[in-house]
Amino acid sequence: DDKAVYTYMPEIIKYYLDEDPILNNVHTYHCSRKEELAYVLEHIPELVIKPVDEAGGYGISIGNKLSKEEIENVKKQIKAHPRKYVAQPIMSLSVHPTYIDETNSFEQRHVDLRTFTILGENREFVLKGGLTRVALRRGNLVVNSSQGGGSKDTWVLKN
């Protein structure tokens, strides 16, 4: 599960490289920390709640998509097992025209672009490609293939 790695990546970079990360992570609230737990419980409608022991986009709760009853259920789950959850602000994902077989047309879908770079002592370059994950269900913010997502061709063009 890569969530745990991304959650602690800034600390890993600092520890092993004695450098600050070049890119910022999305802020992650650890429900196992008392102050952060209190914040999460008060702000669930603004957050994405993620279990740390799941993979493939399973178990995720997107706060602004939850009913009042669902929010209360999420609060109960978090309170019962705070170490099991982290939370992050809901991000505004980019959208991209995507061909949808069922409608035989292009429609906007949320995407997540993963590019890959190689850093060396004397050079740095972006690989000629990447991974663009796409949420194939209309309005879905979870782009994981396990949750009905797919991928799109990604080209990196040199200036």
Image: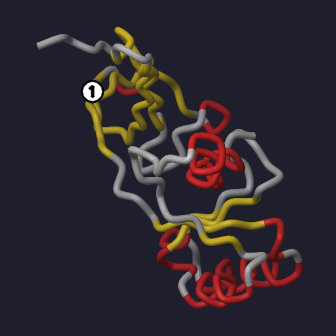
Q: Quadrant of residue 128?
A: top left
In the rendered image, residue 52, in percent from the top left (x then y), is placed at: 77, 56
Q: Is residue 59 above or below residue 116?
A: below
Task: Assign the C terminus to one quadrant of the image.
Answer: top left
Q: Which residue is tagged 1? A: 106
In the rendered image, residue 29, in percent from the top left (x then y), is placed at: 61, 71
- How many residues crowd mark 1 within 10 Å: few (<14), some (14–19), many (20+)? few
| 159 relative position to 149: left or right | left
Depth check: give the residue in front, 88 or 126: 126
Depth check: give the residue in front, 102 or 22: 22
- Residue at the (21%, 12%) spot, across then down: 157
Q: Is residue 108 above or below residue 92?
A: above
Q: Is residue 15 above or below residue 108?
A: below
Query: Element under label 1?
Result: strand
| 89 relative position to 72: left or right | left
- Residue at the (42%, 17%) spot, across then down: 121
| 40 relative position to 124: left or right | right
Q: Is residue 39 visible?
A: yes
Depth check: give the residue in front, 24 or 54: 24
| 11 relative position to 93: left or right | right
In the rendered image, residue 158, in percent from the top left (x then y), is placed at: 18, 11
- Residue at the (28%, 24%) spot, across then down: 105
Q: Is residue 153 visible?
A: no
Q: Is residue 129 above or below residue 112?
A: above
- Residue at the (81%, 76%) spot, across then down: 82
In the rendered image, residue 24, in percent from the top left (x then y), is placed at: 42, 53
Which colouring convention does the figure follow?
secondary structure
- Circle 1: residue type: Phe
Depth check: give the residue in front, 157 or 139: 157
Q: Quadrant of residue 67?
A: bottom right
Q: Residue furthest right?
A: 80
